[in-house]
Amino acid sequence: MPATRQNYQEDVAGRANVDDTPELLAYYDELDDLNAGALWTVANKIEPWEPQSSSVPMLWRYNDLRDHVMRSVDLVTPEKAGRRVIYLNNPGRTDVAAAVGWLYSGLQVMHPGERASAHRHSASALRFIMEGSGAYTIVDGHKMTLGRNDFVLTPNGTWHEHGVDEGGSPCIWQDGLDIPFVNAMEANFYQVHPDLGQAVGYVVDDMTKTWGNPGLTPVGGAWEKAYSPMFKYEWEPTYEALSKYAVTTDGSPFDGVMMNYINPVTAGPVMQTIGASMQMLRPGEATKAHRHTGSYLYQVAKGSGHSIINGQRFDWQERDIFCVPSWAWHEHANASDRDDACLFCFNDLPVMKALGLYREEAFGDNGGNQPLCA
Ligand SMILES: [Fe+2]
Ligand SMILES: [Fe+2]
C-alpha cells in the first residue's frame, strides 16, 4: 500500500481537500480493484478553474520545413503514402497528432502530373495553398483550380482528391482537419473511392462561380447541406474585401480588420466543425491582447510581424504557421509601417459556439498588452 497518493488537494472552500489516512488509502485500493475511484481524489484535476490547454504555443517556420517537405517527394509516392503530408506535431498533443487542441494540420506536396487517390472521411478538411501552380481539388465531382492563398473546403463525407496538372509546378498547401476531434468523439469513418478517382461532372470552378458573388445569391440555386456550397474562396476577392473594409472601420482592437469565410446560404461558418477567417493588420498596427476558448491555427498569408502568446514572442513571416491554444492570451503586430500583413486562421469556433462553450475576455492590465516572459 502506498504511503501517499496524488489526490490534487486544494485548500479552498468548495474544492476537494481530503488528507490521506491509512484507512482511506486502503479504501482507494479497494476501489481501484473494482475499476472505480473516489471523485474527491481527482475532482480538482478533472475540473480545473479554467481551461488548461495541453497544447504548447508554437511557430513552425516555413524556411525550416520547406526543404523537408520537398524531400518527401523523393522518399515516397502519393500512391504509397495515400497522402504525402508532413504533419505539424504539437509537443503537448503528440498522442493525438494534433497541431493544436483537437485540430490536425500538415503540409502536403505534389509534383506536376501527380494525383492522390480519392477518398472520404467523417473529418472535415480544408486546404490553404502556399506555393506552386496547376494544383486542383475535386470535391464530389466539382473540380477547382487552386492558386496561392486560395482556401478550399473538403467537408465531412465528400469524396475528394487532389493533384497537380502536367504543366504546373511543384505545389505545397496546408491541410487542416478536425481528425483529433472526430476521433475524440469516436465517430471517424474513412473510405477509399472504389475507382480511386472521380469523374468531373461539372464546369470547372462552378461552385465558386455560382455561390461566390458578393451580395448575390443564385435564383433557383438550392443547397440543403450543412456546409458551404462555395467550396473555394479565392485570394484576390478576399484581399480586395479586406482592403475595402479597412477603409471603413477602425477594426477590432484584438484582430485588426478581420473577416470570416462564410457559408453564403446561412452566413454561418463554412463547415459544421471548422471556421476560418482572414485578417489584415494595417501598416504599423499592433493589437491588444485577449483570450478565448477554442483552438486556432494561423498561416501568414502576407507580410511579416510577430504575435505574443502567453507572454512569449513569436516572429513570423509569409507562410509561417503558428497556433494559439485555447484560453491563451494573444496579440498580433505588423512589422511593417508601409505594407499590410494578412493572417489566415482556421479554428474550432463552430464547435465551441454550437456547444455553448465559447468565452472571451480582454487582457485588462498593462494597457492591454502582455508583459513578455523572461
Ligand atoms: Fe481527405
Ligand atoms: Fe483572438
Image (cartoon, rainbow, N blue to C red):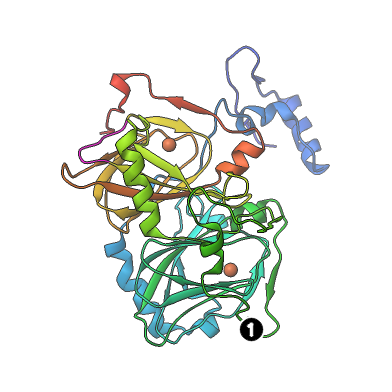
At a point 29% along the width and 33% down the height, the residue shown is 373
The quadrant of the picture occupied by the C terminus is: top left
State whether the magenta stretch is mostly helix, strand or loop.
loop
Q: Quadrant of ligand 2?
A: top left
Quadrant where the N terminus sits is top right
Q: Which residues are magenta?
A: 282-287
User: Residue 200 placed where, x, y %?
Assistant: 60, 80
Q: Amino acid at mark 1?
A: Leu
Residue at figure coordinates x 20%, y 38% from the top left: 284
> Seen in the image, is 27 located left or right of residue 74?
right
Indicate yes or no whether the magenta region holds residue 143: no
- Which of the 4 image quadrants contains residue 14? top right
Quadrant housing residue 229: bottom right
In the displayed orientation, state which residue is furthest to the right: 34
Height in image: 1 above or below 236? above
Question: Left or right: where does residue 178 sit relative to residue 309?
Answer: right
Residue labelled with disc 1: 196
Q: Nearer the viewer, residue 233 or 131?
A: 233
Residue at 56 percent across and 64 percent down: it is 207
Mark 1: few/some/many CA within 10 Å (<14, 14-19, 20+) = few
